[in-house]
Amino acid sequence: MGPKDIVLHSISTSDFMLNAYLDGLSDADLKIRPIEGMNPIALQLGHLITAERMFAELLSPGSSPALPDGFEAAHSLKEQSGDDSRFLTKDEYLALLKTHRAVILSVMDSLSDADFGDTKDGTLPPFAPTVGAILNIVAMHSINHSSQFIAVRRYLKLPVAF
C-alpha cells in the first residue's frame, strides 16, 4: 500500500461520513444555526468546496473549474451577515463537491509516490508544506467541520449517523 492508497482510503472514509451526516437534511436544514455563533451547514459546505479548489490549484494550477460568481465570498467563514439567500441547494453543493473532488483525485492520480514529498519550491502553506500534506488535509477537512453537522442533526432529532 502506497501513499496514494492511504490518502484515497481517507478521502473515501471522509466522503462516506460527510454523506451520512447530510442524509435526511433538506435545503432549509442546511441553513439552521442551532446555537448562536455556529455557522450553518451551507456555509461549511461552501467553505469545503472553496478549500478543495484552492488545494487542487496549489498542486496543479489551472486544473479546477471556476466557482460560481461570488461563491467564495458568500462562503467565507468570516461572513456572518445572516443572509441565507446566498446559499445554494443541497444538490448544488453536492454537485460542486463531486466536481472538485474529481479534480483532486485526478491530480493525485497523476502523481508518483515521490511527488508526495514535493514542497513545490516552498510555495505551499506552512500548515501543509508538501504535496502529501495537502492531500492529507483534503482527506481530513470535512471531518474537521462535521461536529457542526452533528449539532444540526441533534437539533432536528435525526437518527445518529454512526
Image (tube, rainbow, N blue to C red):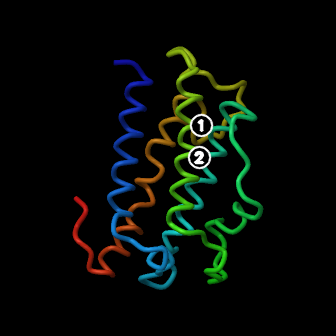
Identify which residue is drawn at 51% across, 42% down.
138
Which SS class for mark 2? helix
Query: Residue 52: image x %, image y %?
Result: 59, 46
What amino acid type should be assigned to the residue bearing mark 2? Answer: Glu
Lower sequence index among marks 2 and 1: 2
Quadrant into which the N terminus falls? top left
Q: In the rendered image, which quarter is residue 70 located in?
A: bottom right
From what the image shows, is residue 128 above or below residue 121?
Answer: below
What amino acid type should be assigned to the residue bearing mark 1? Answer: Val
Q: In the rendered image, which quarter is residue 65 located in?
A: top right
Query: Residue 21: image x %, image y %?
Result: 35, 62
Q: Which residue is mark 1?
A: 103
Q: Which residue is mark 2?
A: 52
Do labels 2 and 1 touch, CB within 8 Å?
Answer: yes
* In front: label 2 or label 1: 1
Query: Residue 40: image x %, image y %?
Result: 51, 74
Report crowding for label 2: few under 14, some 14 to 19, many 20 or more residues within 10 A (C-alpha): many
Report crowding for label 1: few under 14, some 14 to 19, many 20 or more residues within 10 A (C-alpha): many
Query: Residue 121: image x %, image y %?
Result: 72, 24
Identify which residue is drawn at 27% across, 75% down.
158
Quadrant into which the C terminus falls? bottom left
Which SS class for mark 1? helix
Identify which residue is drawn at 38% across, 47% down.
14
Front-lying residue, 97 or 11 = 97
Left or right: where does residue 89 sit relative to residue 19? right
